[in-house]
Amino acid sequence: MIKAVADSGPFIHLAVLNQTALLQRYFQPLMIIPQVYDEVVTQGNNRAGAPELAAACASEAARIVEMADHRLIDQVRHGASGY
């Protein structure tokens, strides 16, 4: 399986389509940063994607990981490639 890091968009949009299982089908493990969990589950409580992401984390299909490389975070935010 392919490892992947996801932002909130895939969970929200696939939840609207009732297709969040596609993420688990193609990506193992699926990793998210704590800010994504907070945005989707905590702040987005009772919205599309919240129960799906909470369940994925509870079953360890999705893992919350801290990103320590702030240079990489800045590159991702600004759309830089090379990784």
Image (tube, helix red, strand yellow):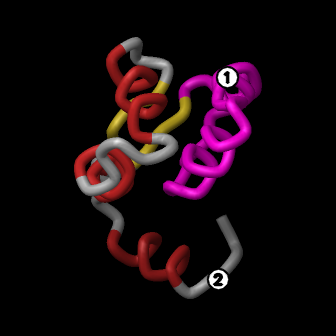
Q: Mark 2 or mark 1, which has the lower sequence index?
A: 1
The x and y percentages for residue 6 are: 55, 49
Region of the chain picked out in magenta, as a range:
1-29
Residue appearing at x 52%, y 56% in the figure: 7
Residue farthest along the bottom direction in this orientation: 78
Q: Is residue 35 above or below residue 23?
A: below
Residue appearing at x 69%, y 72% in the figure: 82
Q: Is residue 62 above or below residue 67?
A: above
Q: Is residue 9 left or right of residue 60?
A: right
Q: Nearer the viewer, mark 2 or mark 1?
A: 1
- Residue linked to disc 2: 80
Query: Is label 1 in a helix, a strand or a loop?
Result: helix
For the residue pair 34 and 8, the one nearer the viewer reads as 8
Near mark 1 (Cα within 10 A), the count class, few <14, some 14-19 or many ≥20, is some
Near mark 2 (Cα within 10 A), the count class, few <14, some 14-19 or many ≥20, is few
- Residue linked to disc 1: 21
Q: Is residue 37 left or right of residue 15?
A: left
Where, quadrant-wise, is the C terminus in this rendering? Answer: bottom right
